[in-house]
């Protein structure tokens, strides 16, 4: 008896979704309210339910169609809300989550990441650059010290070649500052690349030709031909020419060329006709 009463109450609750004036006609047609609710899901079922509540009267059918359509839309929204609530229940974590543990893990990761920053910045730097990064954090200071290192290396090449700028440097009161000035605003990375490119060529030039600076074009082309036979990279010629260009510009090689041209013109016999 209790079970039968419960089922009757449940059926009554389901019938209550329909307007009161429709329930009697629907009950006479459908034994269970779920049947009528399922029929509303399909176009054919919708027309069947509409015919029941309107008594198949054409005028009533037209009047009740909008109300039944609104009811079907409301039921669809309610079903979506109920389904989302069920899905949300499944998505809840089965084990308790302590917010403090999560925040503690984030703090630990942040500390570890900050500790690794100096090592990440060392990547791609020269030996001096890495040693500077170990003790300095100011990038401007690091750039300045790295630049001084490569200025010193390149100035050694210029001194060995006795390029015209050497005379100007020796006449300066602060030679270190003068060397910094003649290299202009070139960055430490640029000076490093030029010094490394010229280093291999200078070793070959000194060993094969006994020179510290090329005296003719063949001193450069012969070196490149030998490197080509050894399978050098395609960027080697361009890097060497870039290094020579910097050293020529800083070393004021054009001043020596002008001086030689002046001496040749002075020593040349006059072409004027004799009086």
Image (spheres, rainbow, N blue to C red):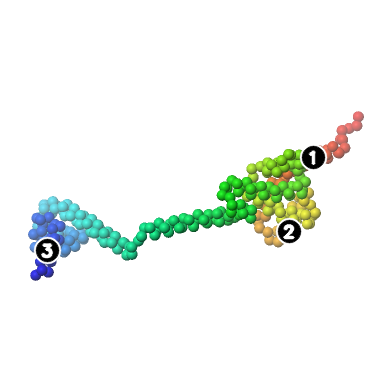
Assess whether mark 3 and mark 1 are in contact (beta carbons under 8 angstroms): no
Number of numbered discs visible in the structure rendering = 3
Location of residue 60 in the rendering, given as x and y in whole percent from the top left corner = 11, 53
| Quarter of the figure with residue 222 | bottom right
**Label 2, label 1: how many angstroms apart (C-alpha)?**
33 Å
Residue at figure coordinates x 23%, y 55% from the top left: 77
Pick whichever, 38 or 263, lies toward us: 263
Residue pushed farthest top?
275
* Position of residue 97 in the picture relative to residue 57 (left or right): right
Residue at figure coordinates x 68%, y 59% from the top left: 232
Residue tagged by mark 2?
226
Residue tagged by mark 1?
259
Q: Between tags 2 and 1, which lies in front?
A: 1
**Label 1, label 3: how many angstroms apart (C-alpha)?**
117 Å
* Position of residue 85 in the picture relative to residue 219 (left or right): left
Q: Secondary structure at mark 1?
A: helix
Residue tagged by mark 3?
9
Q: Between tags 1 and 3, which lies in front?
A: 3
Residue 45 in sight in this render:
no
| Quarter of the figure with residue 23 | bottom left
Pick whichever, 225 or 98, lies toward us: 98
């Amino acid at each position: 008896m209790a079970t039968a009463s419960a089922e009757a109450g449940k059926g009554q609750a389901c019938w209550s979704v329909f307007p009161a004036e429709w329930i009697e006609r629907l009950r006479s047609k459908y034994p269970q309210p779920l049947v009528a609710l399922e029929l509303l899901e399909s176009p054919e079922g919708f027309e069947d339910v509409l015919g029941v509540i309107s008594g198949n009267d054409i005028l009533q059918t037209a009047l009740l169609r909008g109300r039944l359509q609104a009811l079907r839309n409301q039921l669809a929204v309610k079903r979506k809300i109920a389904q989302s609530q069920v899905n949300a229940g499944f998505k809840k974590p089965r084990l308790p989550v302590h917010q403090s543990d999560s925040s503690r893990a984030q703090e630990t990761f942040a500390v570890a990441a900050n500790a690794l920053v100096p090592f990440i910045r060392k990547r791609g730097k020269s030996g001096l650059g890495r040693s500077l990064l170990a003790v300095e954090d100011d990038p401007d200071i690091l750039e300045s010290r790295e630049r001084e290192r490569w200025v010193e290396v390149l100035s050694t090449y210029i001194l060995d070649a006795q390029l015209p700028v050497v005379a100007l440097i020796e006449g300066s009161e602060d030679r270190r500052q003068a060397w910094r000035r003649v290299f202009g605003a070139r960055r430490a990375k640029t000076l490093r690349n030029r010094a490394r490119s010229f280093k291999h060529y200078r070793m070959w030039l000194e060993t094969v030709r006994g020179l510290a600076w090329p005296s003719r074009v063949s001193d450069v082309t012969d070196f490149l031909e030998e490197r080509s036979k050894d399978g050098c990279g395609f960027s080697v010629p361009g890097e060497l020419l870039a290094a020579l260009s910097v050293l020529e510009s800083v070393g004021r090689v054009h001043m020596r060329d002008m001086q030689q041209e002046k001496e040749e013109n002075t020593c040349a016999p006059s072409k004027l006709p004799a009086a």
